[in-house]
Image (cartoon, rainbow, N blue to C red):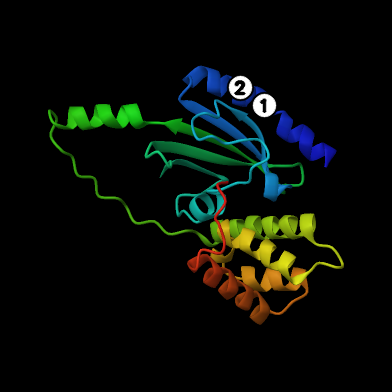
Amino acid sequence: MEEFKQVLESFIPIAKSTAKMFGPNCEVVIHDLTNPQASVMYTANNHVTGREVGQSFDHLVKTVLQSKEFKEDYLAGYTFVTKDKRTIRSSTSLIRDSKQRVIGAFCINFDVEALNQLQQFMSTFLPAQVNVPEKETKSDDNIENVEEIVNQLIEQIIQNSLHPVMKRNQKIELIRFMDEKGIFLMKGSVEKVASLLGISKVTVYSYLDEIKNKSSKGEVNEKDL
């Protein structure tokens, strides 16, 4: 773990210089994916999205790894909207150790709200251009890479929490966390989780149904991570 920490900490000067270069609208976040439940280990200009050290990742699986544009361990230029309706343009690059195991992520979040307002103003004076996007599909190699990354996340999440006398409600909470993070969007994830927790696939699905039923009744509050 100390080796992982040293590798990740070596990216802090890059994070600081990036944030300094692009100013207060640019937030940089470094994630320690060997600790998925509290992956945020460093932030600069964190007022942009409010990310705090000790929080977990949010967009990694659902947005980054699921994107057809995710290749060569990075995705650049994706967007999301904050609770106060600001548009954030982001990029995420994975960090690997000497054995090519994914141990972290380097994320840049840029508040482009002012630029969007300027673009809307300029669009009233400039002719519209229509771009037809080219259709792309993920290569087999890229799919295997994503599946490997998610499998590593599953292993690390369960490894950080599993113990011999783990109770049913603790297993449900662990599955709820993975469901929130988009883990079960990946093919084979249910089987992987069931195997590592020592339960059946049917039990995992029943826990997921229970989580969804409680959520629909307002019994489970979503976390802002």
User: Up-down: is 89 above or below 215?
Assistant: above
Percent x, y for residue 119?
A: 25, 30
Residue 23 visible here: yes
Taking the spot 62% from the left edge, 35% from the top edge, the residue there is 52
List the residue tagged with mark 1: 12
Question: Marks 2 and 1: in contact by CB < 8 Å?
Answer: yes
Few, some or many C-alpha atoms within 10 Å of disc 1 (few <14, some 14-19, many ≥20)?
some
Of all residues, the one furthest to the right in this rendering is 164
Question: Quadrant of the image for the N terminus?
Answer: top right
Percent x, y for residue 57?
A: 60, 46
Taking the spot 61% from the left edge, 56% from the top edge, the residue there is 145
User: Up-down: is 95 above or below 194?
Assistant: above
Q: Secondary structure at mark 2?
A: helix
Percent x, y for residue 217?
A: 50, 68
Q: Secondary structure at mark 1?
A: helix
Q: Which residue occupies the foreground of this view, 142 or 93?
A: 93
List the residue tagged with mark 2: 16
Give the amino acid at mark 2.
Answer: Lys
Q: Which residue occupies the foreground of this view, 37 or 124?
A: 37
Taking the spot 14% from the left edge, 30% from the top edge, the residue there is 126
Give the amino acid at mark 1.
Answer: Ile
Taking the spot 24% from the left edge, 45% from the top edge, the residue there is 131
Residue 141 visible here: no
